[in-house]
Amino acid sequence: ARVEVLKDLGGESAQALAVARHLKNQFGEVARLAPTISDQVKEQVRNAEAPGRLSDLIAGHVNFKLEEKQELLEIPNVQDRLEKLHPI
């Protein structure tokens, strides 16, 4: 298997940070109602400060098909990744 590490782009803009805060709140509500999401994951999401890390954590724990999760991870622009996750 070939692995390529992609550098996050645009994760520190004011808009990306605002979307990240909103998404963190949304995930918190979903996680509160979903017993399958562990307390450890909830804590990791709550403590995630970097928007790119937050998007990757949430993408790994939402009910998306594997192909959709992979597609998310391949988007280098953090704000685009966050916005794609927004409808959770």
Image (tube, grey):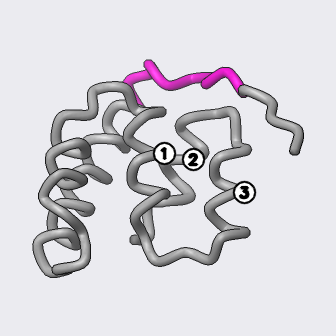
User: Which sits earlier in the primary sequence, circle 2 or circle 1?
Assistant: 1
- Local crowd size for mark 2, using a 10 Å CA cut-off: few (<14), some (14–19), many (≥20): many
Above or below residue 84? Residue 29 is below
Q: CA distance from mark 3 to mark 2?
A: 9 Å
Q: Position of residue 44 (x, y in %)?
A: 23, 42
Q: Quadrant of residue 3?
A: top right
Distance between the alpha carbons at the discs numbered 1 and 3: 11 Å
Quarter occupied by the C terminus = bottom left
Q: Nearer the viewer, mark 2 or mark 1?
A: 1
Q: Looking at the image, which residue is at 46% across and 77% down?
A: 63
Magenta span covers which residues?
6-15
For residue 71, the mark is: 3
In the rendering, at what x and y percent does residue 4 appear? 80, 30
- Residue under circle 1? 56
Tag 1: amino acid = Asp
The residue under the point 38% across, 24% down is: 14
Q: In the image, what residue type sits under mark 2?
A: Arg
Question: Under tag 2, what secondary structure?
Answer: helix
Q: Secondary structure at mark 3?
A: helix
Amino acid type, callout 3? Glu
Name the residue that disc number 2 marks: 81
Per the rendering, the mark at residue 34 is none
Proximity of marks 2 and 1: CB atoms separated by less than 8 Å: yes
Please check the rendered image and state whether residue 9 is part of the magenta-colored stretch, yes or no: yes
* Figure quadrant of the N terminus: top right
